[in-house]
Amino acid sequence: MTSTTQEPLMPVVRARKRPVTVRALLWTGREEDLPAVRAFLGDDFVASEERDGGRVLRIRTMERGSAPDEIPPGWMLIEGVRGEHYACEPEIFAETYELLGADGD
């Protein structure tokens, strides 16, 4: 008799993201804020350029590797727990993060 049983599929599990504190900075799109943005991003800052009547920020992220992400004004710049940088849409940031106060408070 031949067995027709199949190997069990990998189970889908539920998980909760651990509460971690990250640093964040709002990208305003204003040229006068670029020194603060450069200081925050360090070597992950690539450029800032005018595009379609607004200033777009270009940053290096882990997800994109050497091809920089283009960040529109209004997005949050985030420094993760390992010092990595990425950007987040304002709506997603508001749903996912709780503001704790200014850095150093």
Image (cartoon, rainbow, N blue to C red):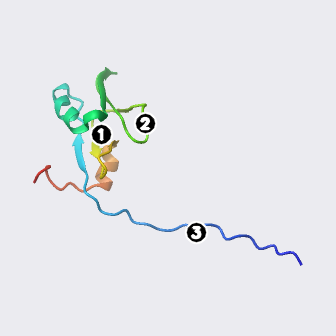
Quadrant holding the N terminus: bottom right
Asked which secondary structure carries label 2, the reply is loop
Residue matched to label 2 = 65
Numbered disc in front, either 1 or 3: 3
Indicate which disc, 2 or 1, sits on the residue closer to the N terminus.
2
Which amino acid lies under the numbered mark 2 shown in the image of this protein? Gly
Mark 1 neighbour density, 10 Å: few (under 14) some (14–19) many (20 or more): many
Q: Mark 3 vs mark 2: which is more N-terminal?
A: 3
Q: Is residue 63 left or right of residue 101?
A: right
On the image, the x and y values in percent for residue 93 come to 31, 49
Measure the C-alpha gap from mark 1 to mark 3. 36 Å
Q: Is 103 situated above or below 16? A: above
Question: Quadrant of residue 61 in the image?
Answer: top left
- Between marks 3 and 2 in the image, the one whose residue lies nearer the viewer: 2
The residue sitting at 30% across, 25% down in the picture is: 47
Disc 2 crowd, CA 10 A, few/some/many (<14, 14-19, 20+): few
Q: CA distance from mark 3 to mark 2?
A: 31 Å
Tag 3 and tag 2, C-beta contact below 8 Å: no
Residue under the point 33% across and 22% down: 51
SS at circle 1: loop
Up/down of 48 relative to 103, above or below: above
Residue on which disc 3 sits: 11
Which quadrant of the structure image shows residue 4? bottom right
In the picture of the structure, the residue carrying the numbered disc 1 is 75
Distance from disc 2 to disc 1, alpha carbons, whole Å, reads: 20 Å
**Tag 1: amino acid:** Trp
Residue 32 appears at what percent x and percent y? Answer: 15, 27
Q: Amino acid at mark 3?
A: Pro
Q: Residue furthest bottom?
A: 1
Image quarter hosting the C terminus: bottom left
The total number of labels drawn is 3
